[in-house]
Amino acid sequence: MRADRVKMPVQDPDVRNTNFCEVALGLDLEHAKMEASRCLDCKNPRCVAACPVTIDIPGFIQHIKEEQIEEAYHTIYQSNILPAICGRVCPQEKQCEGACILGIKSESVSIGALERFVGDYALEQKLQVKEEIEGQEERVAIIGSGPAGIACSASLRRLGYQVDVYEALHEFGGVLKYGIPDFRLPKDIVDKEIQNAKDLGVKFHKNVIVGKSITIEQLLQEMNYKSIFIGSGAGLPKSLGIPGENLTGIYFANEFLTRVNLMKANRFPEAPTPVRIGDNVAIVGGGNVAMDAARTAKRLGAKNVFVLYRRDMTALPARREEVEHAIEEHIDFRLLLNPVEFIGENYVLKQVRCEVMELGEPDESGRRSPVGTNTYKTFDIDSCVISIGQSPNPILKTATEGLETDKRGRIVVNNHQTSIPGVFAGGDVVSGAATVILAMGAGKEAAVEIDKYIRENRG
Amino acid sequence: MYEITYKEILNNDVELMVVNAPFVAKNAKPGNFLIVRVDEFGERIPLTIVKHDETSVTIIYQKLGYSTTLLSQKQAGDSLFDVVGPLGVPTHIRDVKSVLGIAGGVGSAPLYPQLEEYAKRGAAVDLVIGGRTKEHLLLVEDYKKFCRNIYFATDDGSFGHKGFVTQVAEELYQNKQYDLSIAIGPLIMMKNTVLLNKKYNVLTDVSLNPIMIDGTGMCGNCRVTVNGETRFACVDGPDFPAEGIDFDELMVRQNYYKSEEKHICRMKLEPKDES
Ligand SMILES: Cc1cc2nc3c(=O)[nH]c(=O)nc-3n(C[C@H](O)[C@H](O)[C@H](O)COP(=O)(O)OP(=O)(O)OC[C@H]3O[C@@H](n4cnc5c(N)ncnc54)[C@H](O)[C@@H]3O)c2cc1C
Ligand SMILES: Cc1cc2nc3c(=O)[nH]c(=O)nc-3n(C[C@H](O)[C@H](O)[C@H](O)COP(=O)(O)OP(=O)(O)OC[C@H]3O[C@@H](n4cnc5c(N)ncnc54)[C@H](O)[C@@H]3O)c2cc1C
Ligand code: SF4
Ligand code: SF4
Ligand code: FES
């Protein structure tokens, strides 16, 4: 057995940082089999316990080894209907791969790469899992078409319910569409995986903002939905709360990424929505969103893109692979710096002033917390993208009497049920900004509770 | 798809459309707006819901740049790709006895449902309406149904006072008292109206029109500084009491993409030289 993992081929860093094509190119069958043969097929697989949707990981990997890719797909599909997406964006080093037994002595199995291989194969071959769907009369409405909503809708449909998904934007997929860039997750993959849910019979409706276009009460009373699942995500950008934040040239990551991903501003004027960043771009933050913003800015032609982060390199919360790719693409990490003021001229951004930080005692996250040193550095910039987190959008809360939320705006649930009977919730709107697979897991579990609720309330 | 059931050309620059959009019409209130994408690749453009019934909405738009020109190429019977709403908070109707509406150009469209609501609630409503020429004075016949007095101003003097709406309002203030003034039009006009109204101790409400994308509070593009605090016009507005608004900052934000907007119009709208 090889000790080290099979490396996935990637586009050359100096080529890819000028295009929006996918960075990681995927494994071919031969290499997938090679990597699969590293798995020990553990009796008590630690990897499975660390996967939020408990995919039978050794099971699907053994199928790859035997070149039974269709069977591998069926195995994954039992737990995860979006393998081509999760294989690409899960923080594997913190989940399945982080727990893999091989990782103790050498390198863990590339579970994500193998899952992606199977997912891509299924999309290429248009594999479909044939299922008998036993028809039920009852209707369920899903609010939001992100990973939580998609997973919940598919699970409910497989239980036989009539499922309608209502989405505020003009495309489906949530953050998968407007947040995560093409070079990490090509949008046609998202569309194809959503097509699977459509093929099951889930109906998707765009341009409907629940709480505005229609209320939860109207859905229940007038449109005869027996139950509702809220998967509206965490779409509200957090601000730094420092002077000058509304100067022209300062973006929240959501705006910047939406312009490029959803509105295709990188193809302006072919696409009519523009985006402008200039030569020197500062990105504030250190998570996946910040990495995506930085690498997008580079691809739009910025000469210098630097990440301002208040802790050190070891504390960056982004997926490890993204940080490595960002470094290869010449993103400049300026660490232990905390922006305190934006300085402009005639309302146009010119500079950002940062306090130099040092690391103090560990905080509740276990990481050493940044402490100000009362010394400052100022940088000349043309634009800045603030990427320091998101919280749930208050539209639904405001429009829905009796919907309980905590002080950070997250919906409070008990066994996935909200304070309103029959109304369930899951994903980022409950957990705060988290991950794709956690949102999917929550959507799936909520579907089980919704099924129970509807059965119990049948007259 | 959202079918255009009726279209009317109001003048060289401004047109009216009635669009079938049940999910937008159902809960629409005065002050709400919607977002349109004309075609599959379209920009998202915000427009006020001027009127609505159970299933359709009326919009009035000025052909300013690329997307509104594209919109104007659609005819009754055609469809729009996306229409979403109702967005924004409905107008906060104050408990006042007399209101002066001040409309600049196409601002008379968003002002219409608000003034109508005040009139319905029994307030005495007057209107100053301005435009570049006589043809640019919009909805006058509709306003006549509930306005006590209507005063006119045109840039070229082709109808009413030659000059700005603020000059007409200032004259009115010499011998009339209003509890509230609602000003909607270009940012510079709203800014100047607030300055004038402060002088005469008249409260001012305005409806802001920053650049928007989603219209749901997600992107932050539409932010404005009001009394030193950041507000999102799409979810906290678009109507605000005007006294604390930083209009200068907003004007710069609105012009950020001016060169790109000009560029796309030149590229895609101007007739190509065939030779
Ligand atoms: C830039 C970026 C990069 C990321 N990278 C990763 C990554 O690499 N790996 C990873 O695991 N996670 C990543 N995440 C996090 C991950 O995308 C989210 O945790 C996940 O998408 C949450 O899923 P969700 O279904 O709860 O919500 P969302 O994906 O946010 O979907 C919610 C949907 O609901 C819609 N909606 C909201 N309100 C309403 C309403 N009132 N009516 C109708 N529809 C409504 C929204 O428009 C949206 O489409 C990233 C996030 C961002 C922003
Ligand atoms: C809440 C709201 C309600 C609105 N209601 C109406 C309405 O009822 N009727 C109407 O005609 N217009 C309305 N507008 C303005 C309308 O959205 C813009 O005119 C339109 O987006 C311009 O698009 P364009 O591509 O044709 O022009 P662009 O080429 O994008 O712009 C041309 C010019 O308009 C300016 N501009 C760009 N975006 C906006 C904007 N959002 N608002 C104002 N000016 C802008 C630019 O700086 C430029 O000078 C409203 C805007 C908002 C935010
Ligand atoms: S879904 Fe995510 S955590 Fe689970 S096996 Fe796949 S990559 Fe690992
Ligand atoms: S822990 Fe590692 S070696 Fe064991 S089954 Fe999982 S992937 Fe295979
Ligand atoms: S338009 Fe995006 S937050 Fe207001």
Image (cartoon, coloured by chain):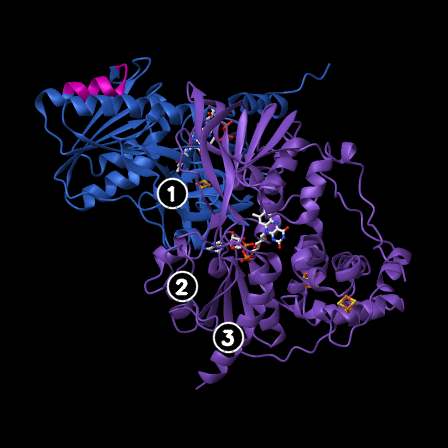
Chain colours: A purple, B blue
Which residue is at the far front? A361
**Chain letter of disc 3?**
A
Q: Position of residue A213 (x, y in %)?
A: 42, 54
| Residue drawn at point x = 18 percent, y = 25 percent | B198
**Above or below — where is B265 with respect to A237?**
above
Q: CA distance from mark 1 to mark 2?
A: 23 Å
- Mark 1 or mark 3, whichever is nearer to me: 3
Give the left or right position of residue B93, taking residue B70 as reference: left
Q: Are marks 3 and 2 in contact (CB under 8 Å)?
A: no
Q: Residues within 10 Å of mark 2 (few under 14, many from 20)?
A: many
For residue A55, say whether it is visible: no
Q: Residues within 10 Å of mark 3 (few under 14, many from 20)?
A: many
The numbered mark at residue A216 is 2
The numbered mark at residue A279 is none
Segment colored magenta = B162-171
> SS at mark 1?
loop
Disc 2 residue type (three-letter):
Ile
Q: Position of residue A102 (x, y in %)?
A: 78, 63
Q: CA distance from mark 3 to mark 2?
A: 16 Å
Give the left or right position of residue A169, taking residue A397 as reference: right
Report if residue A120 lies within the magenta region: no
* Quadrant housing the C terminus of chain B: top right
First in sequence: mark 3 vs mark 2: 2
